[in-house]
Amino acid sequence: QHHYTAKIEETISISPPSPIVQLQAQDKDQNSELKYSILSGNVEDVFTLDPDSGIIYPRVTLMGQPHSYNLLVQVNDGMFSDTANVDITVLDVNQNQPNFIVPTSQNATVYVLENDVADTLVMTVKAVDADPGENGRITYHFKVNDSNVQETDEFIINDETGELRAKIILDRETKLQYQLVLVARDHATPTWYEALRFLTIVLKDLDDNIPQFHSDNDTLPYIFHVMENTNPHTQIGRVTAIDKDDGDNAKVYYYIISGNEERNFMLDKIEGILYTNTTLDRELKSSYDLYIKATNNPDYYSSKDNTQDHFVNKSSSIVHVKVIVKDENDNPPVFKRIEYFAGVNVIANIGQFVSQLSASDPDEGDNGSISYEIIASYLYRGGSNMSSGSVVPSPFTISSTGRLTSASLVAEYNQDRFKLEVVARENSQPFRSAKAIVNVWIYEKQQLIRIILSRPPEEVNREREEIVLELSNATQSLVIVDDIKYHVDASGHIQQDWCDMYLHVVDPKTQTIATIPDVLKVIDAKYDFLKDYYTGFAIENVIPAYVGVREDTFEPALAALIALLIVLFVGCVSVIVVCCCFRHWVITEPLDMKSSDMLIKKAIIDDLNTTENPLWIEQKLKLYEEQELTMQVFCEPESHQLSTQPTLERRDSADMSMIDNTYATIQHPDRHNNVLNLGACDYATLGGSVLPLDNVSSHSQQMYEAALGFQGSTFQVPDNNGLFRTRSELRVNKDGQPEFVSELI
């Protein structure tokens, strides 16, 4: 074999020496002695060759020696020789681990300024290895999950140079620090070593962030409420901004840059607390829009900033603060006009619109809600300036919206006027109120004037006040518009681009509705003055509203009322006639009624006619029952020859049957202690002329007495003398009827 190779470590033992390679040679001669020797390549005699065995040994340490040797060796038997090549490679032994120079500490911390660009050099890692060659060649890595890698999510390291760079923007506000494990590895074979360093990268703050307001709503993150009329320097609210920087770079200062031109607010620039600077009035301004900027500059001036809307809405360091002023009930209601004028047709139905009143309260919500009420309805008769008093209940009513309507029929107030006192009152405390006067005239439609305008009602309503003002100035009277309708032409078609204005004119002196001829005469006289207004207002004509208009309408209710009145009238007449007939009827008494019963009934009826209380009738009857009835009334005489008794005389009871006179039992009370000496059985006779009965039957005589109404009565004799007087003679005709009745006792 003429070529040998061997690899040995530089740390091969030299004491005792370790064999490296053994040369093998053969000689065909017998008993020949072969001797080995190194001819060349043994630099500095590093190796030695045993001449007998042919084994090559290291003679000195190979540390620091060349790593490759090419030896030329020879074998000799004394006569002949042969050569061979031996290549010896000295392998380095990895005796040293890499050693970090940068960073020096096992747990190193490096501070790096945050930046706003990527691929920023953080540091350069440096390590050394005392081993020569590959054993001492070092590469740099990151240790991640027990594997050597060249980059992480945030950093990358150059394996040869050791430059550590950031792959991303290092933002301290995003992440304050990073933890890395550095690796320095040699390339020895078969055994290699590596060194580790724990590196903490701390980002130093750079004032690269502005303070920011955080909110879900970027346009209105702050809404503050404050009660109106509060004292100045009242705290409203607080705004807060966050600066992600550290230390002095994180200090925030607050400034109002817009919306506070009137200096109504002030802001604590350090704490961000907002205060009122004046007393706020919601009725003047109900809300304020402030823009507040947060900055790190303690000497910031708002004039330096661009406060345009685009910038304000986009910058996170500027916040929109809305201050809402809450309402307090500090304002009374106010009518739009103090006095209103209106009219109502005399035949208007209930609920007819009269006028629209309008009052306002600048307060908000319940504090500004208003209710209307009619507190008085003074009536002024036609042509009178003196009130007849307030009509209760009022013929008018008003709704919660100020709509004034009729509450009853007003026909009885024709040509009269009302002066209504209407109040608008708050619905919340302190219940302040305002008062307005509404003048209402009751008119007939024939008193209205119609103004024809070649304009639609919508436009006329907008200029209604101006038209009324000019007509009032021209007529020097009060012009009141009652209605505005679409114009109807002569053929009955509605013209929606024309309208008719119905109005009546009131004389300001008499407060009565002026007549149409007088009004038209005044308007015609002021034609030159009004013609320009006619053109401007598009007035085509001014005429009476209802000339020659006669309506023949059938009112069922009126017809029913008339029929009812007729029935009532006929009924009343019938009742009167019946009553008169009953008054003249004569009830004939039965002939067989006893005279005593007739006398008693006569007395009872007379007593009742004196309007005596009927409760005492029973007592009266008992009194009459005690009297002794001793005469017969209207009995037939037994003798046709009657003697004349011109005066009152005493008779025996036995003679009573022979005389046709009326008698009564006399029970004379003891009056003034004077008693008539008539005796217990004495009688008093009603004197008078005795009728001759020669030619008259007894029945005729009874009828005659009945005709005189003389039926007899029980009576008491008066106290004074001369009580009885002679009854005058009664004359009868041939038919037995009285010709003349002079007197009747």
Image (cartoon, rainbow, N blue to C red):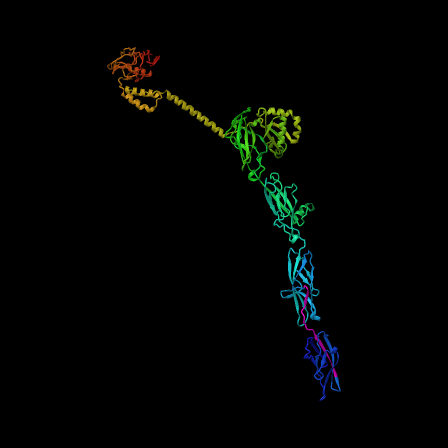
Q: Is residue 660 visible?
A: no
Magenta-tinted stretch: 82-103
Corner quadrant of residue 433: top right
- Rendering coords of residue 557 (x, y %): 49, 30
- Rendering coords of residue 234 (x, y %): 60, 43
Look at the image and tell me in which quarter the N terminus lies: bottom right
- Rendering coords of residue 280 (x, y %): 61, 40
Corner quadrant of residue 424: top right
Look at the image and tell me in which quarter the C terminus lies: top left
643 to the left or right of 225: left
- Dominant secondary-structure state across the stretch colored magenta: strand
Q: Nearer the viewer, residue 345 or 576?
A: 345
Q: Nearer the viewer, residue 321 or 92?
A: 92
Q: Nearer the viewer, residue 603 or 61?
A: 61
- Rendering coords of residue 338 (x, y %): 58, 31
Q: Residue at x 41, y 23 (%)?
A: 576
Q: Residue furthest left?
A: 654
Residue 299 vertical placement versus 732 (above, below): below
689 to the left or right of 74: left
Residue 166 vertical placement versus 296 (above, below): below
Residue 190 vertical placement versus 431 (above, below): below
Q: Residue furthest bottom?
A: 30
- State yes or no: residue 94 in magenta: yes
Q: Is residue 375 visible?
A: yes
- State yes or no: residue 532 in magenta: no
In this rendering, the count of numbered labels is 0
Q: Nearer the viewer, residue 278 or 407?
A: 278
200 to the left or right of 606: right
